[in-house]
Every structure is written in C-alpha cells, then in structure tokens.
Amino acid sequence: MEDEILAVDAVDAVDAVDAVDAVDAVDAVDVPQPRPQSLVLAFFGNHVLDHGEGDLGVYSGSIIDVLGRVGTGEQAVRSTLTRMVNRGLLRRQREGRKMFFGLTPHANGILRDGGQRIWRDGAVNEDWDGTWTLLGFSLPESWQRQRHDLRSRLTWSGFGALYSGLWIAPGRVDVRGIVSELGLDAHVKVFHARADDFTDVGLMIRESWDLEALAARYVAFDKRWTSADLAAADPVAIRLRLVAEWLRIIRTDPRLPVRHLPEEWPARQAQETFRRIAEQTAGPAGRMAEEVLETTPLRSASTGTA
C-alpha cells in the first residue's frame, strides 16, 4: 500500500481516499463511515493494479463479496460501481451473464498517486530542501464560489493559509493544473522561495496548519492498529481497511518538514505500524484474493449494469 499521481479532479481524489471502516472489528474507536467508492478503489489498488498482464476486470460478485467483509452492502456496492463507471473511474465488460469491472487510466493514476505517497514519499518529510511554494491570489468579492473552490483545491494539495490571500506549501508544488482548471490564471501568482533567517519557520507552520488535528489522526491510527488482533482476522478485509485508512490520513497530510514539527511527531510511529501490518498481511491477503476473485482480461470499454 498513496500516491504519486496528481492530475486528478480534487473531488474524485478526496473521495478516493476518504475511506475508513466504521464497523472496525479490530478496535472500538469510532471512525468515519466508509465511502463505498473509496473502498472500491482501495480494493483495486490492493488486488488489481500491477497484477497480471494487461488490463484486468473483476467480476462484480467478487467485489461485492470482498466489500461485504468490511460491512458494505450489496446494493451500495452495485450502485457505487455504476456511479464510478459514469464518473470515468471504472470501465465494464459483460461476459455472458456476468459483468466485470476494471480501472480506467484516470483511476489508475489516482491509485499510482496513492502508491507513491505510501511507499516512496512516506508520512515523514526528512529531505526537505528549504524551498516553499507561495501562491497569492486576489479575486473579486462576488466570486465566492471560485474562492471556495480554490481554497479547497489548495488545501487538498498540501497548502496552508499564511494570510487570507497568501498560501504556502513545502517544496516545489506544481499548481498550474489547478489554477487553469478553475480559470484563475489571471488572478493567481506563484513563487518558489526560501524563508529568511529571521523567520520562525516552526511558528509559521503552527499558524498555517492545524498540527494538533493532524497529530491526533496519526495517534488514533497507531492506537487502533497496534491493538488489532490480526491472527483470527480475514486478511483481505484487514488489509483493505488498513490501506484505506492510511491513505485517507496521508492524503490530508501536507508533509511538513519534520525538523520544524514538535518532537516525537507521531507520524513516524504510525508509519512503522502501517508498514509492519501491511507487510504481515500482504502474502495472506494476496493468496486469499487469488482464490476468491474471478477475473478476466478486458478488451475495451463497454457498457452495461452491475
């Protein structure tokens, strides 16, 4: 098991990672109700992406079976699959009386983005070079929707508000796609710079991001999964919940430079817990998936119902 692919629609991308199991048998801590679309994408990331040759389709009954193991009902899965086809995230192919679903290039990108974030970038930013991306904007007072959309996209992309019209993010962030898609090229200015020595970077970070909320998510994740009883659990269900929850957390993490964060930042311990359990469940989940999933090579995009 996030992520390096980001030329995706922000709504799709947030939906793709905002998944945590609300009926989590391994812990009593309340977590948000899972979004079926998020779980479907996590399922494909675990068991379809990079498995086999060419594009692979999975029988809808197999998807229903797996998501049922984490508490998602059949009707919710069927309606989600159809909706994801309509949104360009999945494509489908009928084989006799059965419908098979596979990834579109758009969804493939979302999942590869997640894989980059999870396995290569990680949750702890230790290699920051001191560079910041600064984005300033000035919009007419009547453009409330455009202002809201821009702020939402910037937040998702790891930016924090230094001032109302000046947002910052660590590293060099390419926001051309976001700005152009929103039609705001003439109203936005972007710079890459380094803070002067007299600037208190730690204070700037604390003022621009909610570190307490971010840390709490890592602490809760670590507590939940270190106490999980994995021995008697379904490895496919456990891995699906693990990956979906971890991806949701790190997608909302701007990867701030760890040297400017509070001591003993909990992301490191949470990441170690995630990777330990991910490694522990990879083999069993993969073997079980091979036994229960019915797949077929996909020829081309087609239509039908789940």
Image (spheres, rainbow, N blue to C red):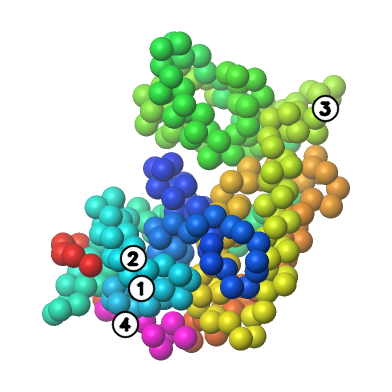
Q: Earlier in the sequence, mark 2 or mark 1?
A: 1
Q: Tags 2 and 3 in contact by the CB under 8 Å rule? A: no
The dot on residue 77 is 2
**Residue drawn at x 41%, y 43% as measured from the top left:** 11
Labels 2 and 3: the sequence-earlier one: 2
Which residue is the site of mark 3?
A: 200
Using a 10 Å C-alpha cutoff, classify the residue at mark 3 as few (fewer than 14 neighbours), some (14 to 19) or many (20 or more): few
**Disc 2 to disc 1, C-alpha distance:** 8 Å
Q: Earlier in the sequence, mark 4 or mark 1?
A: 1
Please report the residue visible at 59 percent of the width from the left and 46 percent of the height from the top.
252
Left or right of residue 56: residue 238: right
Query: Which residue corresponds to the image point at 61% horizontal and 52% vertical from the top-left?
Result: 250
Give the CA distance from mark 2 to mark 4: 16 Å
**Kind of residue at badge 4:** Glu
Name the foreground residue: 34 vs 215: 34
* Contact between labelled residues 1 and 2, with CB atoms less than 8 Å apart: yes
Question: Residue 21 appears at what percent x and percent y?
Answer: 53, 63
Q: Measure the alpha-carbon separation of dots 3 and 4.
A: 56 Å
Mark pair 2, 3: CA separation: 49 Å
Mark toward the start of the polypeptide (2 vs 4)? 2
Q: Which circle's residue, 3 or 1, is located before the other in the chain?
A: 1
Q: Nearer the viewer, residue 276 or 245?
A: 245
Residue to which mark 4 is pinned: 294
User: Residue type at mark 3?
Assistant: Asp
Quick one: label 4, few (<14), some, or many (20+) residues within 10 Å?
Answer: some
Relative to 296, is 123 above or below? above
Q: Which residues are magenta?
A: 288-296
Disc 2 crowd, CA 10 A, few/some/many (<14, 14-19, 20+): many
Q: Is residue 189 on the magenta stretch?
A: no
Residue 295 lies in the magenta stretch: yes
Q: Which mark is residue 63?
A: 1
